[in-house]
Amino acid sequence: MDKFVIRGGNPLVGTVRVSGAKNSALPCMAAAILTEEEITLENIPQVRDIDTERKLLASMGAEVDFGTVSSQHRTTISCRTLSDPVAKYEIVKTMRASSLVLGPLLARTGMARVAMPGGCAIGGRPIDLHIKGLEKMGATIIQEHGYLEARASRLKGAHLVFDKITVTGTEDLLMAAVLADGETVMENCAREPEVTDLAALLTAMGANIEGAGTSTIRVQGVSSLHRATYRINPDRIEAGTYLIAGAITRGDLTVAYCNPDHLRAVIAKLEEAGVRIDIPAADAVRVRPGNGLFATDISTEEYPGFPTDMQAQYMALATQAEGVSLIKENIFENRFMHVQELVRMGANIKVDGRTATVRGPAKLSAAAVMCSDLRASASLVLAALVADGESILDRVYHMDRGYERIEEKLRSVGAEIQRMGNVFAPRVPAAVAD
């Protein structure tokens, strides 16, 4: 099992490039199910979840082309034949995004059998909102033996109101609605950039969508969709992680190939904490030390608020800030699993329910720590970058689910970080059809 060995103390200096957004690429890959024609996606990150999604689509009968090694960030998917519309447990057990094939499979084939999703154990991400919406659109869904089985002759447009904001629920039902008969109105939708990314692809495929990026989305169903080529947005969470890496190490780091507009909540908090922020180009953000690092409070919210996927990383930064920071987690109820590992490194953190109190600055010291989920892994990497001595991070396969070769990117800007074990490298076959 792979480990990271990190020696702290080096400021990060230079430029680091952001990859495509995993959380955009996954639903966009699922959208290929909706048409018999080829979908080409560019700026695909090479991470484990993408490899899992490729295997999932191939297992259903799709042809998935990842090109050559030199063009592995581009993929063409052809779902001309879907011989087995089943998301098998052995493939999707490590990935929450498996639920995203439910809607498109049902809309395209009239049936779907999808294993209940796996992924990070950070709290409940109930699929009941997906089920409720699809049932209103005319589907019959039963749950047994760990699978959801859904059937519908053809989905019907409906008025859907989400009980709570859900990104995957919005995406799943949006994909179902584009081939439904009539108009679908979705209210209390997620507004995340990943949703607008998916809507842009669907529109390029011939879908009729209005309001993506707002709380109300209207969809006029069409009879079929066609081929399209689409470039995935940069990963705003990866970009935010590198911004904090520059800030926590008191470095001079430019994060390139990002979208600063998607990072406004993170940038605002970093500026409040005393970090100097510049926008040197339309696709870059630069962080530099200010006159100190000061405690600030954060409260995670749906977009455009402070993202839950940045909470753990910001907590690592808070350990180095002067004063007391209150960090409130409003999205997931079990997303403080990184706290005990940060405490082992010397952090002063107390948790009361959904609020963590961080007192800083703390002198962190190297330790052997365990990665518990994707973003918790990132927080431990950040802490290790400023810890005294050599830290060992175990179970970094969590990191590989969402960050493309993070150790190489950090090493290129001055970090002392090495991977020990079997290096993850997604297979890059010419074509995958089984």
Image (cartoon, rainbow, N blue to C red):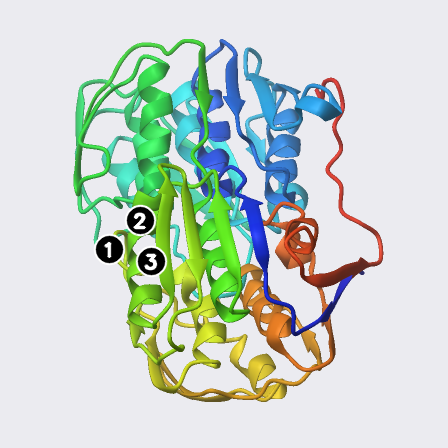
Give amino acid for label 1: Lys
Amino acid on which the number 2 mark rests in the picture: Leu
* x, y percent for residue 144: 51, 48
Q: Which residue is mark 3?
A: 267
Verify CB contact (< 8 Å) between mark 1 and mark 2.
yes
Query: SS at mark 3?
Result: helix
Q: Which mark is residue 164?
A: 1
Residue 88 in picture, x, y percent from top left: 62, 39
Placement of the N terminus among the 4 image quadrants? bottom right
- What secondary structure is marked by label 1? loop
How far is mark 3 from mark 1, CA to CA? 26 Å
Residue type pointed to by label 3: Ile
The count of marks equals 3
Q: Could you give the CA–CA distance between mark 3 and mark 2, rounded to whole angstroms? A: 32 Å
The quadrant in which residue 342 appears is bottom right
| Image location of residue 158, percent across then percent down | 18, 31
Closer to the camera, 311 or 361?
361
Q: What residue would you read off at disc 2?
A: 129
Tell me what residue is drawn at x 43 percent, y 69 percent: 314
Q: Position of residue 306 (x, y in %)?
A: 31, 61
Front in this rendered view, residue 286 or 230: 286
> What secondary structure is marked by label 2?
helix
